[in-house]
Amino acid sequence: MKGEQGPMGPMGPIGDQGVKALRSSFPAANQPVVFGRIIYNLQQHYNPSTGVYTAPVNGTYAFSFHLTASTRSLKVGLFWNFQPVVKSTQTYELGSVSQQVMLHLSLGDQVWLQVKDIVSNGMFTSSEASSTFSGFLIQPDTCDIIMGRELPPPIIRGEYTWGDPDPTLSPNV
């Protein structure tokens, strides 16, 4: 026999819905793009000094970017632990490129954007045009409380290569 429904439990913590904007045009190639103008980063999972988002828990995350290109073409990739997940190209002198991807990340995984090289680095920002990057947790794998959890040290190894990922290392997208 089924009893009465119990009281509603407490609301879970809010995911880090970080939104960042590019502060200066034409960032360095082959390294994470630093989005220095922070629009929202309450839980500090995005590091504005390195340009890297670090997953606070195992779970499903959404990442998106909308970038303005000017002066030259733009080739940009979204990287997950030194592997390119998606790549986008804008070949026009003035245009934009956007992507959105959902990933399953483990605690400590890192995600960032980077441009391919100096020749195809038309990433642009101004008072009239913004380039933005966003990442946030959609659903944790467990009901663990995610506030105040210690993060592992950042991953500072590997190469920032633009080539196709090694299929033996490629994450499931």
Image (cartoon, grey):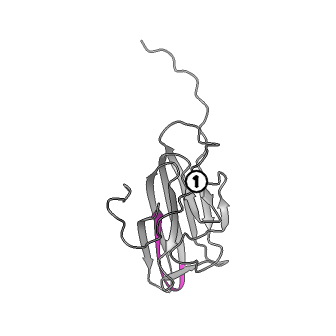
* Helix, strand or loop status at disc 1: loop
Q: Residue furthest left?
A: 167
Q: Residue at position x 49%, y 86% from top?
A: 119
Q: Residue at position x 67%, y 63% from top?
A: 38
Residues packed near mark 1 inside 10 Å, few (<14), some (14 to 19) or many (20 plus):
few
The image shows residue 49, relative to residue 95, as above or below, that is above
Q: Residue at position x 46%, y 51% from top?
A: 105
- Which residue range is magenta in the image? 69-79
State the residue in front, 7 or 28: 28
Which quarter of the rendering shows the N terminus? Answer: top left
| Total numbered badges shown on the rendered structure | 1
Q: Position of residue 10 (x, y in %)?
A: 61, 32
Left/right of residue 81 with respect to residue 23 in the rendered view: left
Which quarter of the rendering shows the C terminus? Answer: bottom left
Q: Residue furthest top?
A: 1
The image shows residue 161, relative to residue 108, as above or below, that is below
Find out whether residue 70 is within the magenta segment: yes
State the residue in front, 2 or 162: 162
Q: Position of residue 110 (x, y in %)?
A: 51, 58
Q: Position of residue 78 (x, y in %)?
A: 47, 66
Magenta segment's dominant SS is strand
Left/right of residue 10 with respect to residue 102 in the rendered view: right
Q: Residue furthest front?
A: 157
State the residue in front, 82 or 40: 82
Find out whether residue 142 is within the magenta segment: no
Q: Position of residue 116 (x, y in %)?
A: 47, 77
Q: Specify the amino acid type for callout 1.
A: Pro
Q: Which residue is under mark 1?
A: 153
State the residue in front, 96 or 102: 102
The image shows residue 72, relative to residue 142, as above or below, that is below
